[in-house]
Image: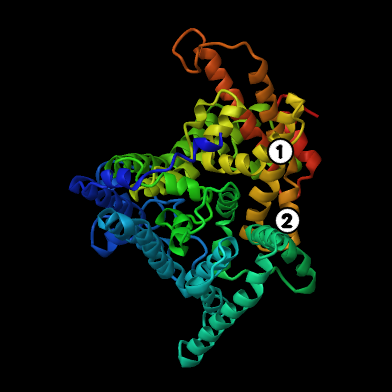
Amino acid sequence: MTGLLGGTPISKKTQQENDRHNPVMVLAVLAFLLVYIYLFTYASKSLELPMPQDLSESLGLYVDHVFDDDRNIDSSLYVPFTWIFSKNDDERLVLFLGVGFAFLLVYFIPLEHKQRSLVFSSLIIIGILYGMEGVSGLLCAHSLVFLILHPVSSFRLWIAFLPGFFGFWTFDPYMLLGSNALVQSLLAGGISVLIYRYGVLRLLAFPSAAKVIRVVVVQSALITVLIGALLEGWFTGPWKLALGVLLFFWHWERLFLYHIDYQDGKIPETISFMTYLSVFLTPGQIANWNWGVTIGQGYAYTANNFLCEDKNKLVVSGLKLWMVSLGYLVLGDWIRANLVRFFDDQGILVYWRIENMSEDFVMGSTIGSATVLLTTLIALMKWTFAWGGVVHFKVGLWRVCGYKVDPYFNFPWLSTNLVSLWSRFTFHYREFLVRAFYYPVFFKFFKGHTHLRIFTATMAAACFGNLIWGHMTEAVFYSGVNRNSIFISLNQWPYFVLLGLGITASEFWLLHKKKSPRRPWTPDKYIGWDVLSAYVTLQYFALIHIFVYTAPEATLADSFRLFLTGLGIHF
């Protein structure tokens, strides 16, 4: 399974053959970006064009749950963690214009400079959206990681200047630019060179010390979370991370995968700093920085999938995903609202949010099984629409820029069991869990006991790794580095346990079921079973989210009672 997303090494000759220009593709990309700009920004108002809602109504289309108060389309596609612009519509405009610039640059620039151009354009977009604090923090952190994983000497020692220089601007970004500040930043860079040359390099010469240091760097996000929770007692509030450091920590899971490639010997020993940066700094990550953070995987995935086929074919596939993204972003809330209205008309109460249902249940309201099932299923659908719109845009952008990146969602509603759902739903995140947790456990423990081996590896990935590394750390970045954020995340443990047990049960069933040449969704007399299996799979996955989206006053017992109510068991 590791190789499924990794691809095979691609030769320069093949990349050159795939680097052929087509003006039609260029115009198509720019046309799509103009559509995004029209629908999701204030550009039409500035150009004195009809706003999207005005245009819709002039055509006789009056729809709810599509447009926002500004009369353009309400969207889950945004730029987080920045307050440089007062409106997210303006941030989206910068993003779309920056994407257009990045595309034109990478499309026409010579092959040897293409990936570097994406780093360059990404830093420009990040600089406009996040300012010096964001750019300097990213470069400080990534240069430090590079120096630890790939020690440098002699003429490459200039890289050791970067952590100190950019670190100065990361933690004191609002200092007035002047000669004193510049001298201090240069001095900080010089000190970092000396520390690296005469301290860090000597430590890295000892294999045991080098191993520990590299683990600390790769696991820096989790370590920061734990230390921050401990230090909370010594401070009056949560530990606030510098913006650039926070942005870097959202690269953590990809850094984890990069380190796996490093341990597997898939990264050249002579890798340049710019090549390293090209793994992490691409325009495809900037929108919704903290969503779909595993897209792109590690070094091997990005290196092997860049211009591995004709770039115009990649552009077409990216535009198809942008079309799907538009469908989700424009129609997602409208579909959900009409489904809720339909069931309400049938006399079945469906809540807008699982938390509201949990709150009413705790307060003593009588809630039926149909309400629980439909509320959780439609909530899952709503989440999929919101995330689908964003991650299809992001993956589409990766493809438009020349990377053959697999879709994040791969028709999850066709999953007839939880193993299939795990492969189709949040695809790249699943690959992170499999490579970081499932494989190491599966190939190391209980080799003579198949069922115990599968159970342990699955729970390590879907339960333990998913909770601690995948969700707890991210929850802290969302809510603040404090103990309360950790406790709230850990209290969701039943979701992860039930997910792991469900996947394990599906694995056991697939292991022992009678082999059949029939493939799911073959249009024959058994297709009804496929429909039922898909519903049961999705409903179970939706139902266990009761333990994630709970009312603050709900106890664990309340959540279990509500979960059992969905199964038709009432207490």
Task: Tell me: 510 left or right of 277.
Answer: right
- From the image, tell me which residue sits under label 1: 441
Determine if residue 173 is in view. yes
| Residue placed furthest toward the left | 23
Amino acid found under the numbered disc labelled 1: Val
Amino acid found under the numbered disc labelled 2: Ile
Q: Classify the position of the C terminus by image quarter.
A: top right
- SS class of the residue under badge 1? helix
Query: Is 367 drawn above or below residue 157 in the view shown?
Result: above
Q: Position of residue 424 (x, y in %)?
A: 52, 33
Q: Position of residue 547 (x, y in %)?
A: 70, 41
In which quadrant of the rendered view does residue 477 lie? bottom right
In which quadrant of the rendered view does residue 431 lie? top right
Q: Position of residue 291 (x, y in %)?
A: 52, 51
- SS class of the residue under badge 2? helix
- From the image, tell me which residue sits under label 2: 486
Q: Position of residue 61 (x, y in %)?
A: 31, 41
| Residue placed furthest toward the bottom | 180
Q: Classify the position of the N terminus by image quarter.
A: top right
